[in-house]
Amino acid sequence: MLCFESDYIEGAHEKILKRLGETNLEQLSGYGNDPYCRSAKEKIRKACSCPQGEIFFLTGGTQTNMVVIGAMLKSYEGVVAARTGHVSLHEAGVIEYHGHKVLELPQHEGKICPGELEAFLEGFWQDENREHMVFPGMVYISHPTEYGTLYTRQELGELSGICTKFQIPLYLDGARLGYGLASRDTDVTLPLIAQYCDVFYIGGTKVGALLGEAVVFTKNNMPKYFLTIVKQHGALLAKGRLLGIQFDTLFTDDLYLEISRHAIDMAELLKEGLKKKGYRFYLESPTNQQFLILENKALEDLQEKAAVSFWEKPDDKHTVVRLATSWATRRESVEALLELL
Amino acid sequence: MLCFESDYIEGAHEKILKRLGETNLEQLSGYGNDPYCRSAKEKIRKACSCPQGEIFFLTGGTQTNMVVIGAMLKSYEGVVAARTGHVSLHEAGVIEYHGHKVLELPQHEGKICPGELEAFLEGFWQDENREHMVFPGMVYISHPTEYGTLYTRQELGELSGICTKFQIPLYLDGARLGYGLASRDTDVTLPLIAQYCDVFYIGGTKVGALLGEAVVFTKNNMPKYFLTIVKQHGALLAKGRLLGIQFDTLFTDDLYLEISRHAIDMAELLKEGLKKKGYRFYLESPTNQQFLILENKALEDLQEKAAVSFWEKPDDKHTVVRLATSWATRRESVEALLELL
Amino acid sequence: MLCFESDYIEGAHEKILKRLGETNLEQLSGYGNDPYCRSAKEKIRKACSCPQGEIFFLTGGTQTNMVVIGAMLKSYEGVVAARTGHVSLHEAGVIEYHGHKVLELPQHEGKICPGELEAFLEGFWQDENREHMVFPGMVYISHPTEYGTLYTRQELGELSGICTKFQIPLYLDGARLGYGLASRDTDVTLPLIAQYCDVFYIGGTKVGALLGEAVVFTKNNMPKYFLTIVKQHGALLAKGRLLGIQFDTLFTDDLYLEISRHAIDMAELLKEGLKKKGYRFYLESPTNQQFLILENKALEDLQEKAAVSFWEKPDDKHTVVRLATSWATRRESVEALLELL
Amino acid sequence: MLCFESDYIEGAHEKILKRLGETNLEQLSGYGNDPYCRSAKEKIRKACSCPQGEIFFLTGGTQTNMVVIGAMLKSYEGVVAARTGHVSLHEAGVIEYHGHKVLELPQHEGKICPGELEAFLEGFWQDENREHMVFPGMVYISHPTEYGTLYTRQELGELSGICTKFQIPLYLDGARLGYGLASRDTDVTLPLIAQYCDVFYIGGTKVGALLGEAVVFTKNNMPKYFLTIVKQHGALLAKGRLLGIQFDTLFTDDLYLEISRHAIDMAELLKEGLKKKGYRFYLESPTNQQFLILENKALEDLQEKAAVSFWEKPDDKHTVVRLATSWATRRESVEALLELL
């Protein structure tokens, strides 16, 4: 079976496993208070050109959104997000369960539009009844988005400017951040993200780690007693070293970007191969997630030999499926898939 | 100043004040355990032709939505509502604050469409990823809606059938229920609502009472220990008699419907007068809320002598305003307003 | 039946009903934005000698505790209270339901001891593991307490000093505040409370009103967008006038204290009469709640002709019952009760 | 430095790391839907003699308490626990943050007393005011307790009987369960726990794993849509394999018990050695946590060469410290510590 249904079907990069083995019997303090966590944080601050960055390691994307959004919003505030944002649709209502509304904006290939954001915020502040409504307290974007698309430097700058104007933080969900940074078609870098966003996270689970996401607060704005807040969400790992060692490895010798680039190479190989064969894509994605339009019959045949993700049905005869490559995708698998299709 | 901005600008119907005075020094048990509450419940059960109805009195609409929706949903469920539903927009996020997502459907003059509801529910149950999503656990409608419109008997039946099929309760927000029942253009009655809805409330605050809403559970489905749940939301009144006496009065000799009819008469008088003068309405409302389209300049002039509610701006030159009549609106006020316009 | 089981078994003081009647058909803005609310706030500020006081009217004691404590605590904080505090025991867990732990201290006739409070706070801040614990974020006291007892000026000053030292607010639950202020055995005044407490509330429900509590923030510390927070708890009354008119009446010509004094007079009459007859009290209460120790058989006989509240059983043969007087207690009722016993 | 401050200072048992390496590049479904999770569950069911057991893997103890307690309680219920229970004191209020009160009972060397539990539950159900109070909805015990002590078979049976009588579940927190089962002084087995408890968890983090706890629902009582509930708490791991592989290894060839026995051997070696030297213990613990009473000066000296946990101060001159052994404790370290003391 060829597996392209997601980017979290393998374990971890071999260098990570190796480091876990080497350090296994060292006796280290718990809860992130160990030298590997400290070293990883220092390397991330450097990679972000953000010396004042405050970093905390968590275990998964939904958990990270839960903790960060919950910690930064006031009780009467909600988070603004695209209708297709991960927090809007695919996190089992974790934001609402913790007390906050997701204020949905239209999505454009997974992205929100700066102009629409500004109009929404202005509309709110001009509404005489706003005290009976949910206050917009934060803007959430994912980069890459759930459709594999990327914001441009220009768009990020505009979003950042709007958030500054309305004095609310801009939060970037980087569950697949490596694949965004390594794209051949982006002008966005890690330092730029650290400059434009008030808080963001660098995804590990989908980019080489067993588990783990690194939250970066960029403006001396980590909420007070954040460790307690994390604990209160059941999200504090006793053996924090498990996260520190992984991120320390990923941010040594540019490993994070290097393995991300491999996923992009595999995605481009796949995309070009399929285009040559006349396949159409649902949209143009410059990252590791590709959204292919297949005739229903072709999909049925494919599924006997390859695993892909159902995405949506544009019409009765066709289906959009997602193919995801990752740091672990082998070239032979891509070639075999191209043979199949 | 002529006041048409809402239907809660006066106190209570004189018969209510009279009863409060007459019973004032009787010594009665607290928390709703008094003969006036019992009598009011019995009268409401009769008016609903619902002998098994379980009734609880609360103090306001948002509070009622908070308690009922919170008590009936499981933690992983959300409530389906129109995008313009009161719970979606104008309750400061009370539903999300208490842990549940409002799953928004398109609105059609304030109403949800049975076909769209069914498609949404079917889509959810067919989605392979539904365990990562919010489960639709209840359907919320308002009747009259926030735009003054009414569901038909046919529509209510269809909504009820769909809820039965998917085994989720149908909840009707009747903050202005009297004005819906007394409309000249409705085939919906209180017994019909009790038959089709699993739970609904009869609004008192906007229909003659100082405060108070009567929740009716129609299918032996009042949540266990509901009094404790109410208390836990800070919504249990020590002097429950204050609510019981008011509803007992409103449901004596049909007072609730009688005073609602007066509001409808005043709304019709206003509507006809304005139509004669060539004014246009944003939509056709058969209840006490009327949505008038005014040129901006005309609105400015009007506001010097009359209070109305801003609703929205259909274009740069016009404004939609809401005019609300109520049980207390005097004919002379309507006539004076018609003179002004 | 002679009713002494609680202080909320009658309606409202006649002057309140009269004012409600006189103002009934005035057209007034909703949500507390009316002249009666404004006038009531001004009178309360004067009575408290607290010109900067910010005041908000709510409908009941549990609701007020829910909103005030919820609004003032950070997510990782809890409220310190006596083990017998109303928030600890008799509010159906409303504080925990809204996310906060009640950190319980020992009670001494219903009161907390300043020394024990200070030791607790110091212990917390010295604990190396405190980041894994609930932070004490507020101190809650009731005055009168659930046992009818009162803090002294000296004790309030000490509690206030400790709260200032640890930079957390002192909150006083005044559900029966009138009966505390009118006690013959107190050196605490309303201005003193306003000086020592960061926030407190003046109870109306149990002291002459139909419903209503007036929260007073004394240090320019009302939480931002408090109206929205109130709404989000389902606690915002559409017809805010109902609360404003009542408190305006209660704070006109000292009515609040005058009617409270009557309750104290009746309680003293009862207490002296019973003492003369040789009855013992569970503790010495200087307010309207009296805790009488009865032999079980005597209680049985009594209950045929009078309603009292069961409190606790000190041993197999005796029962402690509560007798409550109020602004509405008639002298003849007290005399009749004394005859019975 | 000799490290005895806790049982989570090392990584994982070598067999676990080996299995992670061997399976690393297998492509497996996410969210626990993989053959390793299935195999681990089957082995745990066998070890528990509980063929109907339903098992879910989570990442840490506080998270597990949060999810299990939150999922099993109704909104108006609280969890009964010892005053020193982990959920009461050391989880940053995670239970209250998620809406439930911890109803505290006295502790006896960390344990609750069946008789006191029964009296508490009976008292609640006899209280006429119980509808204004928090309903006891579950009983929480830890085994071993936070003081290293163990319930006996007799006590567990009694607790179970009381829970059955009052129809509430008994939940056992087994963060250190292995060290309880491997104690030389226990008559409690895994099948017995599965028989007496409605739900419990087998701790991995402190017993050989990198992270991970296995929740076992023993009576076909796993809450419906539990995966969604877990996700809603941010507790669902994308790469569920990481937990499955570890528990599969721990429950192969009795590894879990075998490594637990080693920790007990080391604890006994330490205890006997110290007793011989005349040291006193705070209480008699039959598991891996030992609570030693030291003179303050002796502690100061010790801390230069060994890390231990501060526990409490019984008087001015002495300190109680905790020494914890684990699966990874080396005999030489214990001997070195004995030399030091």
Image (cartoon, coloured by chain):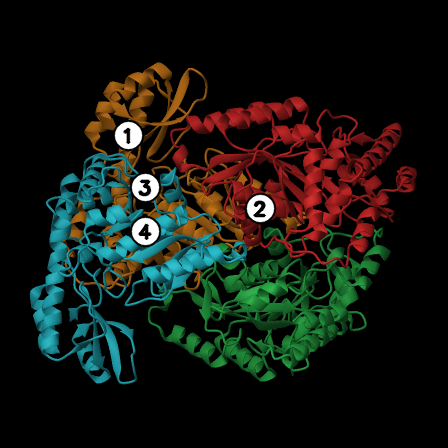
Chain colours: A red, B orange, C cyan, D green
Q: Chain of mark 1?
A: B
Compare marks 3 and 1 and give the one earlier in the sequence. 1
Q: Chain of mark 3?
A: B
Location of residue C294 in the rendering, given as x and y in whole percent from the top left corner: 21, 79
Location of residue B158 in the rendering, given as x and y in whole percent from the top left corner: 51, 46
- Between disc 2 and disc 4, the foreground one is 4
Location of residue A116 in the rendering, given as x and y in whole percent from the top left corner: 56, 25
- The amino acid beneath tag 1 is Phe
**What numbered label is drawn on residue A67?**
2
Q: Residues within 10 Å of mark 3 (few under 14, many from 20)?
A: many
Separation of disc 1 and disc 2 at Cα? 45 Å
- Between disc 1 and disc 2, the foreground one is 2
Residue B65, placed above or below residue C84: above
Disc 1 target residue:
B4
- The amino acid beneath tag 4 is Gly
Same-chain check, marks 4 and 3: no
Disc 3 target residue:
B182
- Between disc 3 and disc 2, the foreground one is 2
Q: Are marks 4 and 3 in contact (CB under 8 Å)?
A: no
Same-chain check, marks 2 and 4: no
> Camera-side residue: D19 or B237?
D19
Q: Is residue B277 left or right of residue A89?
A: left
Disc 4 target residue:
C161
Same-chain check, marks 1 and 2: no
Separation of disc 3 and disc 1 at Cα? 19 Å
Q: Chain of mark 2?
A: A
The secondary structure type at the circle numbered 4 is helix
Separation of disc 4 and disc 3 at Cα? 61 Å
> Camera-side residue: B146 or C241?
C241
**What numbered label is drawn on residue C247?**
none
Q: Are marks 3 and 2 in contact (CB under 8 Å)?
A: no
